[in-house]
Amino acid sequence: MPLLPLERMRVVDVTTSIAGPYCAEILAALGADVVKVERPDTGDDGRAWGPPFWDGESAMFLAVNAGKRSLAVSLREERGREAVLRLADRADVFLQSLRPGLACRLGLGADALRARNPRLVYCSVGAYGHTGPLSDEPGYDALMQAAGGLISMTGERGGSGVRVGSSLIDMGTGMWAALGTVTALLERERTGEGTLVDTSLYETALGYVNYHLVGFRADGTVPRPQGTVFPMVAPYQVFATRDGELMVAGGNDRLFALLCDVLEIPDLVTDARFRTNPDRVRNLEELASVVSERLRERPTAEWLELLKAAGVPAAPVADVADVARAPQTEALGLMQRIEHQAIPDFELPALPLSFDGERSTHRSPPPLVGEHTAEILAEVGYADEEIVELATAGVVRVA
């Protein structure tokens, strides 16, 4: 049986886009009953983000909303907010990523909800954090890659900075929110009271440039785009081979010596320019030129076999299609097949977690808008005729 440490935990998910929904998806895969609150008209903003779409459903939405039930309800309507309050009264976790100040204006702020339910763990996912001169500003992943320094150091040497090709900040923030929520639930076991958990995209971005911040404090170093070069270790970058590209990591003196042996350039090991890692970093251009010349002589597969046999870490540069079909991906069971209401042969990545060797998987597919509205409202005391009335008035949407 899969490990479900959050089984019987109830989560109200009032988030949109990626960061908050990914947090809630993690909690759902760990056993929580997650109710996704979304607008009756369009649902989560992420449902419209694409292409790519899969049979009309946004790939981005599908990727971060598995395992949830959908309650389509208008927070603009007092009767809609009352339904959410009823959910929060019986919930263990309330997760929100509304624009700064909006939750409080709607009567869904931490103080209001915890006054009604003192055991509630309230998790707020923001843009720039809960205090400071930018705390009232909204934000998205790419904005935080810019504001947090990532774009300034990403790209080819001498060129303009570029955005990381995935929503790294969003996904990381979702993970921090999930970790904070689980920690608060553990603390509640000790105290009997809930906690306010707060994280933001900006804080995550700074967490991802942490050693660069330390480096700046140390000697004023400001990192700039360097392609695939790792600026503190050499050689540690992508090199061209005869038929492709190969990431090679000669990350310490022993590995560098092994790499030189495979490349049949042993004299580099005793060369004063390359004797230690700081020496190699200072003289990286000369070193990279020699290594690159040798690696261009053979195809990627041949070099991989030789480097692997010698114990030198290396990996081919794969694209998403390669990764989806990779034997390692299959062996780990990372792509999970789930029966979806509208998409044949649906699958998505499972969590990158295993317990006692068993993969943590999603328990149900991403929901359709309002798919579970009626059953959720019934659970918090609404009669059938009340649900019909709310649906007729446009306060809720029943799929």
Image (cartoon, rainbow, N blue to C red):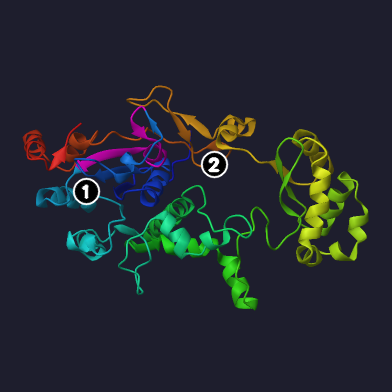
Kind of residue at badge 1? Leu
Residue 293 image point, x, y percent? 82, 47
Residue reaching furthest top? 344
Q: Residue at x 41, y 59 (%)?
A: 143
Q: Is residue 376 magenta?
A: no
Cα–Cα gap, marks 2 and 1 = 31 Å
**Residue highlighted by disc 2:** 355
Label 1's element?
A: helix
- Badge 2: residue crowd in 10 Å (few <14, some 14–19, many ≥20): few
Q: Quadrant of the C terminus?
A: top left
- Residue 97: % across, % down: 31, 56
Q: Amino acid at mark 2?
A: Phe
Q: Which mark is residue 28?
A: none
What residue appears at the point 24 percent right and 35 percent down from the top-left corner?
372
**Quarter location, residue 346:** top left
Front position in the image: 241 or 57: 241
Question: Which residue is denoted by mark 1 in the rendering?
Answer: 87
Ranked by sequence position, the earlier of labels 2 and 1 is 1
Q: Foreground: 231 or 243?
A: 243
Q: x, y percentage for residue 318? A: 63, 38
- Give the quarter of the image for residue 105: bottom left
User: Range of the magenta residues?
Assistant: 55-72
Tell me: 289 left or right of 135.
Answer: right
Residue found at x 52% / y 52% = 164
